[in-house]
């Protein structure tokens, strides 16, 4: 499979134009070839390996490279991935605004690409980054901070464990 290795932080980044408010991207028939940030094409092998949703997008899980903390989830099409791989900064496709956005251009909370991997099914990307500031638009470090949902906690061990209630487990006899 073609390499998804991204440029290190020290590589020169191609500047992107700020969002214009006009729709762009897969849903608007955006022509990436006329984009001023145009750089090298996305490797056709990488593009072929992507399994997109009905909107032409792939989920991108963003993880802090050193702590392995999951910071956020965004969406990418081929152009957003191409920009991410070729500039050293993470670019997403905004489903609500219908345009590309580079993380940190307005907030200053930039994401410097450290690596990109495609999952085994081709339907999700893992983007490891060096995060500056908060990753979430609400100002929290991650988009998951303070948003826990109650769940039954399970565990694996030598004996069989059965969940008995939220947050607790009790061992069972036998198997």
Image (cartoon, rainbow, N blue to C red):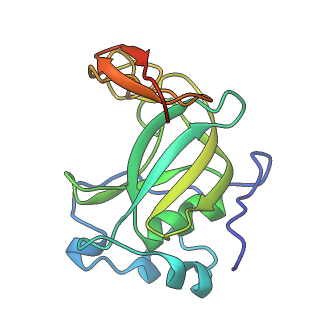
The quadrant in which the N terminus is found is bottom right
Determine if residue 147 is in view. no
Near-viewer residue (57 or 41): 57
| Image x and y of residue 33, in percent | 46, 82
Q: Residue at (49%, 70%) from the top-left corner?
A: 121
| Image x and y of residue 141, in percent | 47, 20
Q: Residue at (31%, 73%) from the top-left corner?
A: 56
Determine if residue 27 is in view. yes
Q: Quadrant of residue 110?
A: top right
Up the image or down, 32 lies above or below 111; here it is below
Label count reads 0
Q: Residue at (72%, 31%) from the top-left corner?
A: 66
Q: Say left or right for 51 vs 138.
A: right
Q: Quadrant of residue 168?
A: top left
| Image x and y of residue 169, in percent | 40, 16
Q: Residue at (51%, 65%) from the top-left corner?
A: 81
């Amino acid at each position: 499979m073609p390499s998804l290795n991204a440029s290190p932080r020290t590589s020169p980044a191609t500047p992107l134009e700020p969002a214009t408010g006009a729709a762009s991207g897969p849903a608007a028939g955006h022509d990436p070839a006329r984009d001023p940030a145009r750089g090298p094409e996305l490797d056709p092998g990488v593009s072929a390996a992507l399994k997109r949703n009905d909107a032409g997008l792939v989920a991108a899980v963003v993880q802090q490279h050193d702590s392995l903390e999951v910071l956020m989830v965004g969406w990418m099409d081929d152009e957003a991935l191409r920009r991410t791989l070729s500039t050293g900064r993470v670019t997403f496709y905004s489903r609500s605004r219908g345009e590309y956005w580079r993380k940190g251009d307005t907030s200053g909370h930039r994401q410097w690409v450290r690596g990109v991997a495609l999952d085994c099914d081709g339907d999700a990307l893992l983007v490891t980054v060096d995060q500056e500031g908060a990753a979430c638009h609400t100002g929290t470090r991650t988009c998951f901070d303070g948003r826990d949902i109650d769940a039954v906690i399970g565990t694996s061990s030598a004996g069989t464990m059965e969940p008995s209630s939220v947050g607790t487990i009790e061992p069972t006899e036998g198997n």
